Amino acid sequence: MKRFAITFALLMLCCLLLANMGFAAEPGYDITEVYQGVDITIDGVFDEAEWEDKWIEWMDPYDARYAFAMDGVPLQTWFIEFLDTTNDAEDVWQICIDGDASDGTAPDEQDNKIEIVGHETVTVYVGDGQGWVEMTTQPTVDWMESLTTTSGRPVFESDHYFVELQVSKEELGAWGANPPPHGLRVAMYDASNEAQGWIAWPPESDPDIPDTWGRIADYAGSIPESLSLGVVALLSSVAVAIAIYSVRNRKKFPK
Ligand SMILES: [Ca+2]
Ligand SMILES: [Ca+2]
Ligand SMILES: [Ca+2]
């Protein structure tokens, strides 16, 4: 009985941790693709309702964040925002996707990079096994950005750039017919702030090395509350407590 209790508790702990951590290219950087909820309007305006039930990720340690959702499958949709207020020709919004989650030290033909440069020019790249080349047929990227005050965005207290963009994953490549996992890197650069450099998720990721990116690990209709960090921590504590209790009281259990 005691062995069963201890084994069960430890097994439950391991399952919970594995379920929450996933198998990220860069450990600790997993998100969930949410495919239900309010439709997103690509207008460069943050609407609380449209992003309420989507995955929003803070880009620590920076005052920046991005969100990702699957809006009307197969439309991959993002917003990105950070404290850039200057319209520079070298400013960049950048999203890298490892479509087949194969990782690697260089982008392959199932990997894409979407870049908006200078608040004007959007280009989609595909990997060739060594680096990035422009896609021969450019997918349609629906995007809109704004540089406004904090209206509707209570998390920031000053003007800053905010962009919403959307692309059909089926136009990005053959991998688009498949659900997650996909590798993911989200990054931006403010050319007026060279000292700050690139802001990226994961923070130390390299756009040319998929091994360093995070992961769209799984998908769900809504944010999976059952796997939130708080719940996992609580259940893990219970599992550990059961194990400790079992060990301390082992003489009380019949063999
Ligand atoms: Ca919007
Ligand atoms: Ca700028
Ligand atoms: Ca790949």
Image: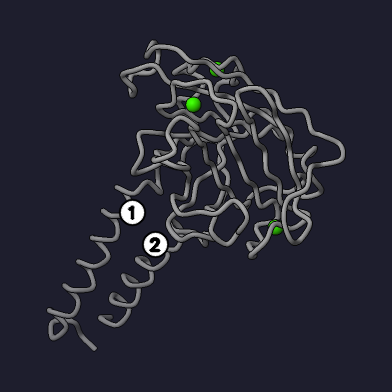
Q: Residue type at mark 2: give it.
A: Leu
* Quadrant of the rendering where the C terminus is positioned: bottom left
Q: Is residue 170 above or below residue 9?
A: above
- Residue drawn at the location 74% of the way across and 33% of the way down: 168
Please say which color scheme the image uses: one colour
- Residue drawn at the location 70% of the way across and 57% of the way down: 107
Between 12 and 187, the one nearer to me in the picture: 187
Residue highlighted by disc 1: 232
Asked if the residue at tag 1 contacts the one at tag 2, i.e. Cβ–Cβ closer than 8 Å, the answer is yes
Q: Is residue 137 above or below residue 86?
A: below
Between 6 and 99, the one nearer to me in the picture: 99
Q: In which quadrant of this rendering is ligand 3 seen?
A: bottom right
Label 2, residues with CA under 10 Å away: few <14, some 14-19, many ≥20: some
Ligand 3 within 8 Å of the CB at mark 2: no
Q: Residue pushed farthest bottom?
A: 255
Tell me residue 128's x, y (percent). Answer: 79, 56
Label 1, residues with CA under 10 Å away: few <14, some 14-19, many ≥20: some
Q: Residue pushed farthest right?
A: 136
Q: Is residue 246 left or right of residue 189?
A: left
Q: Residue type at mark 1: give it.
A: Val
Element type at marker 2?
helix
Q: Is residue 122 left or right of residue 223?
A: right
The span from disc 2 to disc 1 (Cα, nearest Å) is 7 Å
Tell me residue 57's x, y (percent). Answer: 43, 39
Residue highlighted by disc 2: 17
Q: Is residue 157 left or right of residue 116?
A: left
Q: Is residue 101 left or right of residue 225?
A: right
Between 134 and 29, the one nearer to me in the picture: 134
Element type at marker 1?
helix
